[in-house]
Image (cartoon, rainbow, N blue to C red):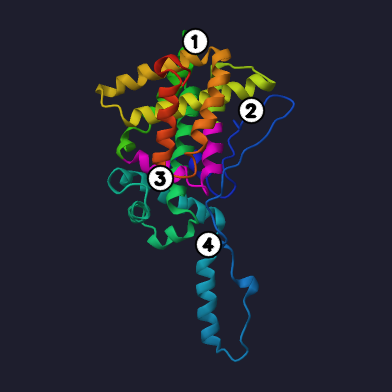
Amino acid sequence: MFRTAARRLLGAGFTTSRLLRLPKPRPTTIIPYSYCTSSTESPIGNQSVNPNQSDTAREEGHRRDESSRKPRAEFEEEQARVLAASLRHVPRLGWTEEAMIAGSRDVGVSPSIVGSFSRKEAALVEYFMDDCLQLLIDRVDSGLDLQNLIPSERVSKLVSIRLEMQIPYMSKWPQALSIQAHPVNVPTSFKQRAMLVDEIWHTVGDGASDLDWYVKRTVLGGVYSTTEIYMLTDDSPEYRDTWAFLDDRVKDAFDLKKSIQEAKYFAQDIGAGVGKSFQGLMNGVMQTMSTRGGRSSAF
């Protein structure tokens, strides 16, 4: 039985009660892109009946139509099962249609279901991102001990828990970032990362409002993204250098006077890379890290 969150990733979108918490009085709800396409709609409503068609032919056509009219909930359940099973093949096949076909076979679903995803590789990456967020939420709800940590340590711990979920896919993660950076996929990628950052701040106990709310989330988004890129180049045992890098970035980020300007730099330097290529995104991040003072800057 796959995760409860998986069922919410399709059709109606991510409907967890922990939606993006904007500062009052401007609440909002973010709903990720639906993976389902209009191909699941019933074809019967627009079907014309040929008066010269034989009864047998009409009956056969009716049976085919009925078989294609699988209830939406059941169809979305199958899609979620396929995506969950596909993740097992990502380390070998990457974030690809081939991995999704292999996943569909694992769960006994026809590989033709892969054609129902309008953005195949993106659907797989977005499923993974949403499932990781739900895993993080469940980890917190199950009693993750943060009480004895100061706020900066809480942030570091939550970010590291989330990034550790990507370790099994690290060799293929540059491909995932490239998929997320494609112009068609950027809006959903942004929403997913915004929800992650918001969840982390909420768990830490942040009660910021107005400008501080936006600044803190922009800063933490930059910390998360640069640590994610740094992790790709880290060959230290158990990613020790990455966690040290993260700790330093978070500590600096709590100096909001410096971080406000760093957030502006980050947006300027990274903006040119997003939507072009993974290499452009990575170059922008590395440029920010080097030109803004390396380990002494917020990013």
Quadrant of the image occupied by residue 259 = top right
Which mark is first along the chain, 2 or 4? 2
In the picture shown, does residue 234 fall above or below 186? Answer: above
Task: Measure the C-alpha gap from mark 4 to mark 2.
Answer: 36 Å
**Hey, what amino acid is under mark 2?**
Arg
Residue at left offset 54%, top offset 54%: 36
From mark 2 to mark 3, how far is it between C-alphas? 28 Å
Task: Tell me, yes or no, if residue 79 can be seen here.
Answer: yes
The residue lying toward the viewer, choosing from 277 and 208, is: 277
Which tag is nearer the camera, tag 4 or tag 3?
Answer: 3
Label 2: which secondary element: loop
As drawn, the label of residue 70 is 4
Q: Counting residues from the N terminus, which is met first, the one under dot 1 or under dot 3?
A: 3
Q: Which residues are magenta?
A: 172-194
Pointer 2 residue = 21
Q: Is residue 37 above or below residue 247?
A: below
Residue 158 in the image: x percent, y percent?
45, 22
